[in-house]
Image (cartoon, rainbow, N blue to C red):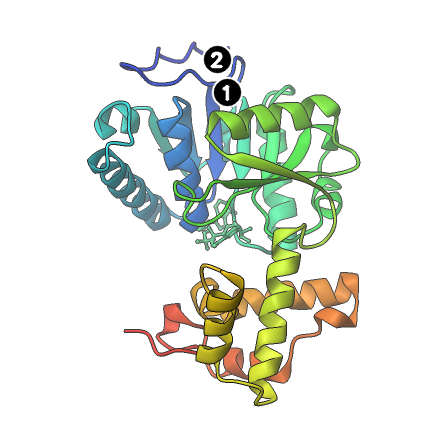
Amino acid sequence: MCPMTDAAAGSLPTPPAGMERAGVVGGGTMGSGIVHVLLAAGFAVTLVDANEAALERAAGLVASSLDAAATRGKLPVAPGDLLARLVLAVDLADLDCADVVIEAVPERIDLKRSVLASIEAVVRPEALLATNTSSLSLTALGSALVHPERFVGTHFFNPVPAQPLLELVRPPMAAEGAVARARELAVALGKEVVEVTDTPGFATSRLGVALGLEATRMVQEGVATPEDIDRAMVLGYRYPMGPCRLGDLVGHDVRLGIAEYLAEHLGPRFEPPQLLRDMVADGRLGKKTGRGFYEWD
Ligand SMILES: NC(=O)c1ccc[n+]([C@@H]2O[C@H](COP(=O)([O-])OP(=O)(O)OC[C@H]3O[C@@H](n4cnc5c(N)ncnc54)[C@H](O)[C@@H]3O)[C@@H](O)[C@H]2O)c1
């Protein structure tokens, strides 16, 4: 028997009925951002990470991003009141009362399939299951589940509290009710929804990677420098950031992984250029290693 959630403190928003208790699995960059927006929207949250140190790090990240939001006047109540509604756990069994669980473990299909199957084994039959994958087939992920009809994609963007978009991915086996609940969840979190069918890379990663690969090919062919390619797209097309700089921020290893997956599933137009492979092999992954197309302090 699951206890009632405590009434939200002060003037917190009320989550949609029947979705007051959320679980997040994987407390990295994305999981901690998702925890922030869930808490701020009045959900009680259980964050599960297999790694104790990662859980501690996630708790610190959530606390500092809530503090920053409070300083900007973006929180309806004090961060401490929200953090009181966060439970940290290493065991998936602690998700037994969750109404909705969002998986945000690393982008590896076997890992995600096994984590999703383990989540399904502990949650209630009516719980909604969602993945934050940025490119993987939901059909392939969902085939690990006994009840794939309650499984959808909720693709958040980094940093989650600041990015307005949520790409809602509808796999063919998803029940209409599950898609509707995911949309309700997104709206409760203040996100704008675009809905896409289950195709590799969805809309955002597919187009983003296509542009990034072509920009890398242009550098490889000596068409222009990374700086000038970026300036061209910023000044000419009003992009907020050029594709070379964006690749440095996302990480070229991440971009390479998605490109290889898209090449396998959508064809050779996503074949990574040699320069991308060389940059990854040399450890020029972008900001996280201090070097990519640009030098980072
Ligand atoms: N980083 C981004 O900009 C971004 C943007 C959109 C979507 N995504 C997607 O979000 C997902 C997570 O990405 P991230 O960047 O947050 O990864 P990350 O590496 O920062 O965090 C992953 C977390 O999962 C934990 N974990 C690993 N195995 C686990 C397990 N078996 N059970 C529980 N926890 C486990 C790790 O300890 C780590 O804390 C990926 O699918 C990624 O493609 C990432």
Marker disc for residue 97: 1
Query: Residue 213 at what x, y percent from top left?
Result: 62, 72
Q: Give the alpha-carbon distance from disc 2 to disc 1, as whole Å.
A: 6 Å
Query: Residue 250 at what x, y percent from top left?
Result: 47, 62
Question: Residue extending furthest front?
Answer: 236
Query: Residue 197 at what x, y percent from top left?
Result: 74, 42
The answer to whether the residue labelled 2 contacts the one labelled 1, judged by CB atoms less than 8 Å apart, is yes
The answer to whether 290 is drawn above or below residue 132 in the figure is: below
Compared across the picture, whether 41 is left or right of 274 comes to left
Quickly name the residue at label 2: 2
Instruction: Name the amino acid, label 1.
Output: Cys
Instruction: Name the amino acid, label 2.
Output: Cys
Query: Residue 254 at what x, y percent from top left?
Result: 54, 64
Q: Quadrant of residue 256?
A: bottom right
The secondary element bearing badge 1 is classed as loop
Q: Compare marks 2 and 1 and give the one earlier in the sequence.
A: 2
| Residue 133 shows up from this direction | yes
